[in-house]
Image: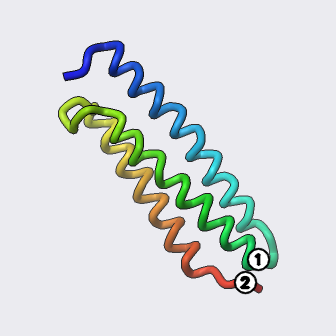
C-alpha cells in the first residue's frame, strides 16, 4: 500500500493528466465547429481524442495496484476513457468535405 506522500504524488499526476486531457477534448470540439473539415482537421481531431484517452489510463497506472486506487477515481477514469472512446469512434466516421 502506498503511503500518503506517494498517494499525493499519484493524485498530482492524475490532476495534471486530466487538465491536459480536457484541453485535448476542447481542441477536438473546436475542430468540429468548422463548417467544412479538411483531411488535416480530421487527423488533428483524431490525434486530440487519442491523446485525451491516454489521460485516464496513465492516471490508473500511477497507482501501484488496483487496491491503492480509490474506487471513485477508478470509476471516473473508466467513464472518461469511455467518453474518449466515443469521441474516437466519431473521429473514425469523419470524412473531409
Front residue (pair 61, 31): 61
Query: Gap between marks 1 and 2, in whole Å?
Result: 5 Å
Q: Secondary structure at mark 1?
A: loop
Within-10-Å neighbours for mark 1: few <14, some 14–19, many 20+: some
Image coordinates of residue 22 in percent, x first then y, are 59, 46
Task: Tell me the number on the disc at residue 96.
Answer: 2
Image coordinates of residue 40 in percent, x first then y, are 74, 73
Q: Residue at x 62, y 51 (%)?
A: 24
- Report which quarter residue 77 is drawn in: top left
Vertical relation: 58 (above or below) 8: below
Residue 19 lies left or right of residue 30; in this view the side is left
> Which quadrant is the C terminus positioned in?
bottom right
Which circle's residue, 1 or 2, is located before the other in the chain? 1
Front residue (pair 92, 80): 92
Residue identifier under label 1: 37
Vertical relation: 86 (above or below) 20: below
Q: Residue at x 48, y 46 (%)?
A: 55
Q: Secondary structure at mark 2?
A: loop
Amino acid at each position: 500500500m502506498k503511503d500518503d506522500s506517494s498517494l499525493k504524488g499519484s493524485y498530482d499526476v492524475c490532476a495534471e493528466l486530466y487538465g491536459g486531457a480536457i484541453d485535448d477534448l476542447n481542441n477536438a470540439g473546436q475542430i468540429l465547429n468548422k463548417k467544412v473539415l479538411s483531411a488535416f482537421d480530421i487527423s488533428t481531431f483524431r490525434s486530440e481524442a487519442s491523446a485525451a484517452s491516454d489521460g485516464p489510463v496513465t492516471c490508473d497506472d500511477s497507482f501501484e495496484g488496483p487496491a491503492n486506487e480509490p474506487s471513485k477515481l477508478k470509476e471516473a477514469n473508466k467513464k472518461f476513457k469511455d467518453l474518449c472512446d466515443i469521441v474516437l469512434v466519431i473521429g473514425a466516421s469523419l470524412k473531409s468535405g
